[in-house]
């Protein structure tokens, strides 16, 4: 049993169980929407965790890749009548290319220099979304006219729940396989020490670039899924605040933890819904809760609790 919980596939199996059992409870359209958004945003945070928690790099501009996927789907559909699913596939290739081009120079930087470089990239993309009215619709955003996807005769909300739940499980499985591969072990060694990794013969620059490109593609995938699900997008989805939100989700859940990515996303998606009763104090209370979590669970929720339970079981 202990070996099972240490397996990188355990979080995927746990989430599969949650996804299957959750519809057994009476869920409103609001609950289904929250669950679906949790699945979609968890995909971004899994990519962020791969980059930060395993490869040891930081990005404050990943909302740009999220926005790229979202706008590729909606702009292609609204202006050119392209199927959203075709737009999704094209956006993944474009995102990978953009991440490779900008990643080669900026990943030479370290620490806060790298953070500022990715922040600058995100700022430029956010300005583009706000200012190019003819392409992106400007601050008012854009809507999509494609019909909702339905599977197995289910309604649109329930169909979206199963589709994006499946996407999340697929991404978790792919990341678990990656972490078990030589590339995953190289990423973890770079996280511990780039110098030591280089001495051992690891191509540090190439491995960091792989982590950056994969995380960018996952952010784009999530952005495209979000646009197809919501059918409306604004520049807020590609803003700096969104990038910071992704980083916060990864840190709160726990860096270096696949399940932590989902838990951190759930905290920042579900918790604000319960705090709306406090009206103008909502954000202050949310900030206070996050501070308490990071003080008492400094490694993030999942790794800190796992370490606590392991210590008490001895």
Image (cartoon, rainbow, N blue to C red):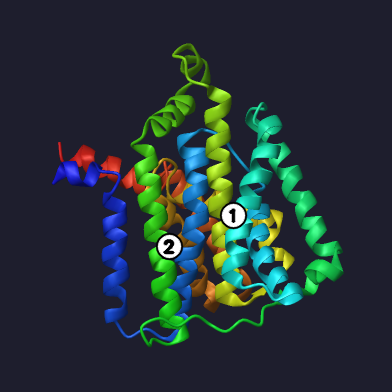
* 180 relative to 99 in the view: left or right: left
Of helix, strand and loop, which one carries label 2?
A: helix
Front residue (pair 260, 48)? 48
2 or 1: mark nearer the eye: 1
Residue 177, position in %: x, y?
A: 35, 43
Residue 276, position in %: x, y?
A: 55, 76
Residue 260, position in %: x, y?
A: 39, 50
Q: Callout 2: 10 Å neighbours few (<14), some, many (20+)?
A: some
Return the disc, 2 or 1, that comes first in the chain's sequence. Answer: 1
Q: Tell me where residue 126 sits by quadrant.
A: bottom right
Q: Can the viewer see residue 32 in this picture?
A: yes
Q: What residue does disc 2 label?
A: 167
Front residue (pair 213, 265)? 213
Query: Who's the residue at 69% across and 65% down the image?
Result: 71
Q: Can the viewer see residue 245 in this picture?
A: no
Q: Is residue 56 above or below residue 245?
A: above
Q: Is residue 156 above or below residue 50?
A: below
Residue 63, position in %: x, y?
A: 64, 54
Give the farthest residue toward the top: 199
Q: What residue does disc 1 label?
A: 92
Q: CA distance from mark 2 to mark 1?
A: 14 Å
Front residue (pair 109, 293)? 109
Query: Who's the residue at 41% across and 45% down the image?
Result: 296
Q: Callout 1: 10 Å neighbours few (<14), some, many (20+)?
A: many
Of helix, strand and loop, which one carries label 1?
A: helix
Which quadrant holds the C terminus?
A: top left
Q: Which mark is residue 134?
A: none
Query: Who's the residue at 61% across and 51% down the image?
Result: 93
Front residue (pair 270, 213)? 213
* 236 relative to 54 in the view: left or right: right
Q: Is residue 184 above or below residue 48?
A: above
Query: Who's the residue at 54% across and 46% down the image?
Result: 215
């Amino acid at each position: 049993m202990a070996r099972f919980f240490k397996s990188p596939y355990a979080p995927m199996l746990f989430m599969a169980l949650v996804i299957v059992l959750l519809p057994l409870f009476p869920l409103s359209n609001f609950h289904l929407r929250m669950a679906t958004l949790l699945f979609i945003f968890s995909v971004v945070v899994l990519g962020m965790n791969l980059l930060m928690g395993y490869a040891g790099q930081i990005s404050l501009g990943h909302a740009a890749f999220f926005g790229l996927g979202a706008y590729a789907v909606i702009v292609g559909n609204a202006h050119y009548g392209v199927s959203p699913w075709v737009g999704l596939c094209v956006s993944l290739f474009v995102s990978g290319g953009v991440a490779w081009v900008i990643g080669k120079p900026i990943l030479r930087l370290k620490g806060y220099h790298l953070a500022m470089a990715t922040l600058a990239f995100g700022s430029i993309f956010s300005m583009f979304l706000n200012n190019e009215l003819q392409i992106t619709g400007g601050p008012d955003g854009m809507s999509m006219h494609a019909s909702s996807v339905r599977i197995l005769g289910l309604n649109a909300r329930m169909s979206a729940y199963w589709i994006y739940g499946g996407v999340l499980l697929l991404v978790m499985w792919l990341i678990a396989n990656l972490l078990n591969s030589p590339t995953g072990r190289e990423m973890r060694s770079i996280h511990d020490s780039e110098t030591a990794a280089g001495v051992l013969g690891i191509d540090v620059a190439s491995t960091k670039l792989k982590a950056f490109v994969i995380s960018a593609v996952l952010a784009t995938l999530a952005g495209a899924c979000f646009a197809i699900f919501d059918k409306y997008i604004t520049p807020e989805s590609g803003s700096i605040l969104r990038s910071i939100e992704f980083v916060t989700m990864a840190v709160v859940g726990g860096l270096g933890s696949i399940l932590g990515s989902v838990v951190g996303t759930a905290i920042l998606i579900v918790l604000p819904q319960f705090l709306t009763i406090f009206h103008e104090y909502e954000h202050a209370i949310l900030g206070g809760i996050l501070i308490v979590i990071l003080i008492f669970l400094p490694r993030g929720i999942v790794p800190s609790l796992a370490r606590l339970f392991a210590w008490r079981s001895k």
